[in-house]
Image: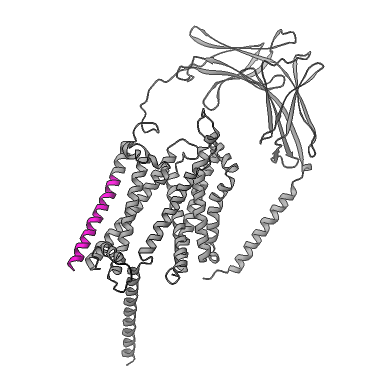
Amino acid sequence: MKTDFKHLNRIYVLVVLLIGYYSNVYAQEFKLSDYKMRFTFSTQKDTSNNRQLEVSFLAANKKDRKDRIPVTEALIKFYHSGKDTLLLIGESKTNKQGIASMTVPASMPLEMDEEGYFNFIAQFDKTESLKRQKKSLQVKELILDLNLSEQDSTQIVTLNAFTKDSLGNQISIEELDVVFSVGGMLSRLPIEEASVEDGVYEFEMPEDIPGDLNGDFQLFVFVDDHDDFGTVLQSVQSNWGVFDDIVKPEKNKLWTEAAPIWMYVVLTILLVGVWANYFYTIIKLWKIKKIGSNV
Amino acid sequence: MLCIGRLDRLHYLFIYPRIQSPITWDIIAIITDLIGCFIYLYLTFIPDFAILRDDKELNVAPWRKKVYRFLAMNYQDTPEQRTTLKKITRTMSAMIIAMAIVAYTVLAWIFSLTLQPGWNSSIFAPYFIVAGLYSGVGVIIICMFAVRKFFKLGHYIRKVHFIGAGIILLVLALLYGYFTFSEYFARWFSHKKNDMLLLDTLFSDYFWRFIFANYIGVLIPVIILFFKRFRTINLITFAGVIAVVGLWFNRYIIVIPTLETPYLPIQDTRPEFIHYTATWIEWSLSAAGVAAFCLMFTLLVRFVPIIPVYELAEGAKNDKRKAKKKAKKNSKSEKKDTSDEN
């Protein structure tokens, strides 16, 4: 049976034209006016009490919610505003994901307003194609104090959560949702979700948490994107972990001194077999030579 | 030997051999494979050496006649000699296939048994075997083209041979492309930190080499060889060249970017540790590898018949025999027809 190549040719040409057409249509479709700028500003306080300020700068398609393009290399200026002052505390450019961040060290003196908030501003200055963006953020200082104690061989974790007013007085938090977790190799393992009332929460620590070689692990308490406090993470080192002290002999690892025995055996048999065949071939060649000399 | 890089330390492998090291096994496997290949090649040449020895009209230097006589091993094409030679040639062909698999596997394990990003892979051994076959067939096509062109052997090396080799190259290109895709897809999708760093490097610093090795080096041969109308001698040879160059780049981007992406943090981060530039010694060694192959091939072409004379003669005999049989059969049937008519 003969294939009709003329028809096939027409199909190839049509496919190429269609690809070209659609790629052109797609290329022409991109218009900045179809996109809305999303400029979000958030903060996270880490275990060292340093504060991370983070801006996410994206262009979101007005019609297609899934179509989001990060604005990269955009210079973001971070300010701290006091009662009468506006202090530039840092600048950062957005990365490939459209995120710019800076760390406010715990040692940096920050001015609190009358209600006990720290005020931050993130600003992107106008360019030829993009409008100016500005977001402010108010955050209260949240102090999470984790204490570990043993009562009648029961391990108790106590959390004191408070904030401070402009005079430095401690004010207990009335209500706060927190998550307790322990540090793992890749992520944190949640062990307790709780609601703090009147600034205190207490719970019994599970006794089967695996620790490291010394039985140590890191206990974390986490507040997730709170309206007043932002995201806060605090931790404490604990020695309550258990360690499975069974030493297993290491076999067949990359760093063991010898390869598996079966490997030596198999490869040796294989090589001996191959070399035996080489010698057999040479012997046969001599035989061929001998036959030839008798002819 | 060239793979080791430091030839000045080659003897260490024999003075201080570590039997648990894949590189020791690599050397053993490569040497065994190489010797096996030479023996096999020699076995296939014996009948031709015998023809050259017996050819009275062959106008060559006396020393060459002596060499042919020595290499012909008194081969007189007796039935016993023929059967023995066929048998050992067949066994040797199986042996060298097995040894090629062992050599490529051990070479792949040198990389894949480490934890380095880009090397720690479970499919490296079959991937290397397929890649070796792919470039091997590419080189055969290029050699066929060169021999055909320079020795004007168009009558013997015909288009049908190129198409046959081209189809094998096509199958291997598809297999090689599939392995390459699986390799990088798994790395990309698993999103391991160091693998992502490596992929970032490949798609930035090594962009064109990566594209050539893994896209152009596979797709161009596939497109040329897939469509019947593109299967001309020149285009099939071009596909072979693209396959070989693509595979060279593939080896390059397997070795170098990984070495530039240290898996563990290192204390001393001198630029020459992070960014690689080949030294003149390395370029010389690479060129020496290509030159050694060309030298061996041209020597072979110079001293032995590049088209197997014995097999051609055998083929001609077989054709005659078949023609005779056919003629006999035809005359018999004609006789039968006339007797039926009578």
Q: In the rendered structure, does residue A55 fall within the stretch colored magenta?
A: no
Residue pushed farthest right? A84
Residue B312: give x, y in percent of width and height. Answer: 35, 70
| Type of secondary structure dominating the magenta stretch | helix
Q: In the rendered structure, does residue A273 fall within the stretch colored magenta?
A: yes
Q: How many marks?
A: 0
Residue pushed farthest bottom? B342
Query: Colour scheme in the image?
Result: one colour
Judging depth in this view, the residue of B238 and A67 nearest the camera is B238
Vertical placement of residue A130 versus B168, above or below: above
Residue at image coords 31%, 86% = B336
Vertical placement of residue A157 versus B161, above or below: above
| Residue A7, quarter of picture | bottom right
Residue at image coords 44%, 65% = B147
Judging depth in this view, the residue of A256 and B50 nearest the camera is B50
- Magenta span: A269-295
Vertical placement of residue A215 versus B259, above or below: above
Left or right position of B252 against A6: left
| Residue A97, quarter of picture | top right
Instruction: Look at the image and tell me in which quarter the C terminus of chain A lies.
Output: bottom left
Residue at image coords 46%, 68% = B160
Vertical placement of residue A19 versus A209, above or below: below
Residue A250: give x, y in percent of width and height. Answer: 37, 28
Residue B76: give x, y in percent of width and height. Answer: 24, 68
Judging depth in this view, the residue of A182 and A70 nearest the camera is A70
Residue B328: give x, y in percent of width and height. Answer: 31, 82
Residue pushed farthest left? A294
Judging depth in this view, the residue of A208 and B71 nearest the camera is B71
